[in-house]
Amino acid sequence: MKKAVFPGSFDPITLGHFDIIKRGISLFDEIVIAIGVNADKKYMFSLEDRKRFIEEAFKDEPKVSVITYKGLTIDLCKRLKADFILRGLRNPADFEFEKAIAHTNRTLSNIESVFLLTAASTSFISSSILRVVIINGGNYRQLVPDSVLLK
Ligand code: ADP
């Protein structure tokens, strides 16, 4: 059984993340969306909200589950018996960043990282820019799954 962990902050989930997860479903038997908890990081949405947005968005998809975690992603993968880490690539900056993480993870474990290129239509979307739009009262409905709007 092919099981992948898709780690991230998801603060909040965007249509970019949504696209990667949807396409990952055809590659894996199970995808665990893992929301990382980093005590040093300030988040806009609470952990509960971030989890609920993703659960709502995939409520009809039995292959997708959502958990929260602390610590190294590779340790989480070992605990869950997941052999793959799924990540999205939007641009060269993502590639450079992801390459260093993936090489480190491969040095420390046997877990393979699998990258999907973003859909052209969502490749510009980032949670950080989205948060600026939200904070300033902009209309963000074209950037997120409906579950994020039901707040
Ligand atoms: P992190 O805090 O690890 O950057 P994010 O929640 O921002 O967490 O992103 C998690 C993953 O989703 C990363 O692999 C990132 O490249 C990917 N991602 C973010 N935005 C998009 C997007 N618009 N399209 C596809 N993948 C994306």
Image: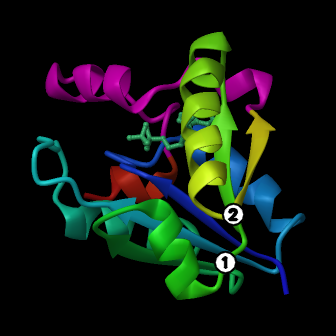
For this orientation, the residue located farthest to the front is 107
- Disc sitting over residue 82 in the figure: 1
Name the residue that disc number 2 marks: 111
Q: Is residue 138 magenta?
A: yes
Callout 2, which amino acid?
Ile
Residue 81 lies, with reference to residue 74, above or below; the image says below
Picture residue at 11% right of the left edge, 54% below the top: 39
Residue 38 sits above or below residue 33 on the image: above
Q: Are marks 2 and 1 in contact (CB under 8 Å)?
A: yes
Q: Which residues are magenta?
A: 118-144
Distance from disc 2 to disc 1, alpha carbons, whole Å, reads 8 Å
- Quadrant into which the C terminus falls: bottom left
Packing grade of label 1 (10 A; few <14, some 14-19, many >=20) is many
Q: Secondary structure at mark 1?
A: loop
| Residue at x-position 50% and y-position 85% | 79
Residue 34, located in which quarter of the rendered image?
Answer: bottom left
Does ligand 1 reach within 8 Å of label 1's beta carbon?
Answer: no
Q: Would you say 108 lies left or right of 84 here?
A: left
Three-letter code for the amino acid on which mark 1 is drawn: Ala
Q: Position of residue 123 (x, y in %)?
A: 66, 23
Q: Is residue 130 magenta?
A: yes
Mark 2 falls on what kind of element? Answer: loop
